[in-house]
Amino acid sequence: MKPIVQISLDLTNIDEALETAALALRAGVDWLEAGTPLILAEGLHGVRALRHAFPTTPIVADLKTMDGGYLEAEMMAKAGATHVVVMARAHAETIKCVVKAGADFGCQVMGDNMVCEDMVAGAKWLEDLGCDYIIHHIGYDERRGLAAAGHRMPSPLDQLRQVVRAVKIPVQAVGGLTLEQAIQCPQYGAPLVVLGAPLTIDADAFKTADGNLEASLRLICTAIHAQQVTR
């Protein structure tokens, strides 16, 4: 599998999300993500707006489903999402319902192992329940809370190789990566590279970061797409 670059639109209004998405696609980004802040602020309207503006682009709806799995996945798919996210800490039946809805509505399922006591086992469990992708994820609050308490900030790279080895499906790493670390993900065997807060989105204000974002994204995409994924 060739590396794929996904931008997480962790924004809070549709207009800025559309503007950032258009910029990102011009720069070479492959997938768009309707980030959790965008879905909370704009709901299905945000997903529909992205689908209307970019009819052929894969769209990940990061709703982080924990219950009501079939209905939530159905709603996101009908709004235009090609990928939906379910959490490993959800009940097994919820994950199965999301997988069933994915099959029924032509949407792929990304299983997120955030806050699993055993991140590697969580990823394997998601694969066994039928997920198509693994999101190996260290959460926003967890990272910031530990850093504020004077502890080392955890990174998804800490266990990324183990997660990749444990599953056969594609893996992406999410949570506090530097640009350099994100670009290195294919070397860990993780072909899905996510660019979001704090890489391209201001992590405190949840708005597009200042600077020449398009030029920076173009360089990043070129560097990622040039790599071979090694497992």
Image (cartoon, rainbow, N blue to C red):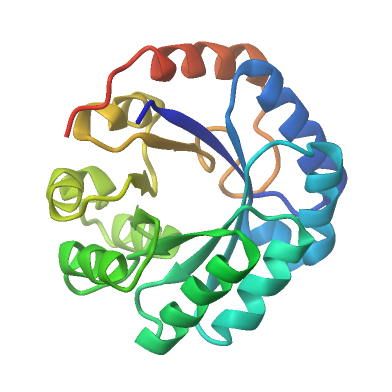
Q: Looking at the image, which is closer to me, 107 or 200?
A: 107
Left/right of residue 133 with respect to residue 84 in the rendered view: left
Whether residue 195 appears in this view of the structure is yes
Q: Is residue 136 above or below residue 187?
A: below
Left/right of residue 103 with respect to residue 88 in the rendered view: right
* Residue 183 at x, y percent in the picture: 36, 25
Quarter residue 209 falls in = top right
Whether residue 155 appears in this view of the structure is no
Quarter residue 80 falls in = bottom right
Total number of numbered labels? 0
Q: Residue at x 48, y 17 (%)?
A: 220
Residue most extreme to the front: 104
Viewport quadrant of the N terminus: top left
Q: Residue at x 35, y 73 (%)?
A: 88
Quarter residue 40 falls in = bottom right
* Residue 231 at x, y percent in the picture: 16, 34
Q: Is residue 206 above or below residue 229?
A: below
Q: Looking at the image, which is closer to me, 86 or 131?
A: 131
Q: Is residue 60 above or below residue 157?
A: below
Q: Residue at x 21, y 51 (%)?
A: 152
Q: Is residue 224 above or below residue 163?
A: above
Left/right of residue 5 with respect to residue 46 in the rendered view: left
* Residue 2 at x, y percent in the picture: 38, 26
* Residue 196 at x, y percent in the picture: 54, 40
Q: Residue at x 60, y 19 (%)?
A: 28
